[in-house]
Amino acid sequence: MILEKAELYIKSGESELFEKTFRKAKKIIASMKGFVKLDLLSCTEENSKYLLLVTWETIEDHEIGFRQSIEYQEWKELLHHFYEPFPVVEHYTSII
Amino acid sequence: MILEKAELYIKSGESELFEKTFRKAKKIIASMKGFVKLDLLSCTEENSKYLLLVTWETIEDHEIGFRQSIEYQEWKELLHHFYEPFPVVEHYTSII
């Protein structure tokens, strides 16, 4: 199991629409092979900042299965225009 | 429920000792009022980088109950010398 992590900075004034759109986009990612679960969280200290945590069975399920899919094009179209700057995505494995 | 998040950069060559020490330190934080769960994860893309995720019942359980406790002094002594730079801690609430 692998955790995909991204900090999302949403363009000013677009948070409400982003959250609404994300609910729709979640169905896309949740239908992919290897998807385990997803959490979208909002930052207490910084307005318009979110934390996206997605658990995948393997890193390939995210990087190949999802990112090279037709579904990813739809995900991208729905969400990527909200981000400024474009997020850095990292992967983590559980230690403790 | 609130998620405490910190990215931890461990001094070069000290990762193994950090992980060992963290297992000991976990008992301290896990005994605190309002502690729900903890995950320590290691980064796939960047050596010596970790993600600490702690779920608390309330932000006060972390910021007051834990940080102003005697137990926090012990936690600090065990762990803070491993970090470089000192981590930025943020709090997040679940949206989706």
Image (tube, coloured by chain):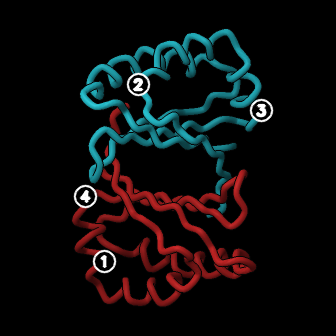
Chain colours: A red, B cyan
Residue A82 in sight from this viewpoint:
yes
**Separation of disc 3 and disc 2 at Cα?**
26 Å
Q: Residue at the location (65% across, 50% down)?
A: B92
Q: Nearer the viewer, mark 2 or mark 4?
A: 2
Residue A76: which disc? none
Chain designation of label 4: A
Residue A67: which disc? 1
Q: Horizontal and vertical percent for residue A44?
A: 72, 52
Q: Secondary structure at mark 1?
A: loop
Q: Nearer the viewer, mark 1 or mark 2?
A: 2
Please tell me how crowded label 4 is: few (under 14), some (14-19), or many (20+) other residues with Cα within 10 Å. some
**Separation of disc 1 and disc 3 at Cα?**
39 Å
B12 and A81: which one is in front? B12
Chain designation of label 3: B
Q: In this rendering, would A41 be left or right of B50?
A: right
Q: Quadrant of residue A14?
A: bottom right
Chain designation of label 1: A
Q: Nearer the viewer, mark 3 or mark 2?
A: 2
Residue B60: which disc? 3
Q: Horizontal and vertical percent for residue B47?
A: 27, 43
